[in-house]
Each structure stands twice: as C-alpha cells, then as structure tokens.
Image (spheres, rainbow, N blue to C red):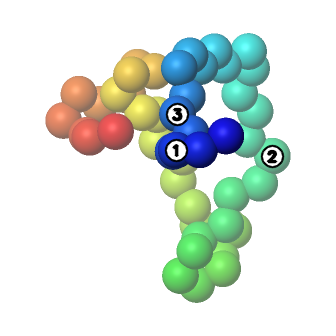
C-alpha cells in the first residue's frame, strides 16, 4: 500500500503499567505516574 498509514479508530480495552523507567537517568524508584487530562488528570496539562 502506498502513502502514510493512519489510525482511523482507537479503543483502549485495558491499561496496566508494569514498569516505568526514567529515559534520562534510568531510575525506576523516583518516577511519578500522572494521569493524562483525557483520563481525569489535571486540566492544565497538555496531552
């Protein structure tokens, strides 16, 4: 198929975080998970 692929529809059935690691220092004990605005997080944050 030619062209750029595009996602027409997306449905999240479940979301589970197994492990989080900082991309800069590789620490996994000081990372805070913050909810995204579209899932009930702070409105002042961007997506």
Q: Looking at the picture, does residue 36 appear above or below residue 31?
A: above
- Percent across and percent down for residue 9 are 56, 16
**Label 3 vs label 1: CA separation?**
9 Å
Tell me, for residue 11, which label it has, or none: none
Location of residue 5 by image quarter = top right
Comparing labels 1 and 2, the label whose residue is closer to the camera: 1
- Percent across and percent down for residue 37 are 35, 27
Name the residue rendered at 65%, 76% in the picture. 27
**Label 1 vs label 2: CA separation?**
35 Å
- Mark 2, Cα crowd under 10 Å, few <14 / some 14-19 / many 20+, is few
Name the residue rendered at 26%, 40% in the picture. 46
11 on left or right of 6 = right
- In the rendered image, the quadrant that contains the N terminus is top right
Location of residue 45 by image quarter = top left
Who is closer to the viewer here, 1 or 16? 1
- Percent across and percent down for residue 44 are 18, 35
Comparing labels 3 and 2, the label whose residue is closer to the camera: 3
Residue extending furthest toward the bottom: 25
Tell me, for residue 6, which label it has, or none: 3
Sequence order check, earlier mark of 1 and 2 = 1
Q: Label 3: state its secondary structure.
A: loop
Q: Looking at the picture, does residue 23 appear above or below residue 15?
A: below
Name the residue rendered at 57%, 61% in the picture. 31
**Label 3 vs label 2: CA separation?**
28 Å
Location of residue 15 by image quarter = top right
Tell me, for residue 3, which label it has, or none: 1
**Residue at numbered disc 2:** 18
């Amino acid at each position: 198929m030619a062209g750029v692929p595009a996602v027409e529809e997306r449905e999240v059935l479940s979301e589970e975080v197994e492990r989080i690691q900082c991309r800069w220092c590789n620490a996994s004990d000081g990372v805070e998970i913050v909810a995204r605005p579209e899932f009930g997080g702070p409105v002042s944050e961007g997506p």
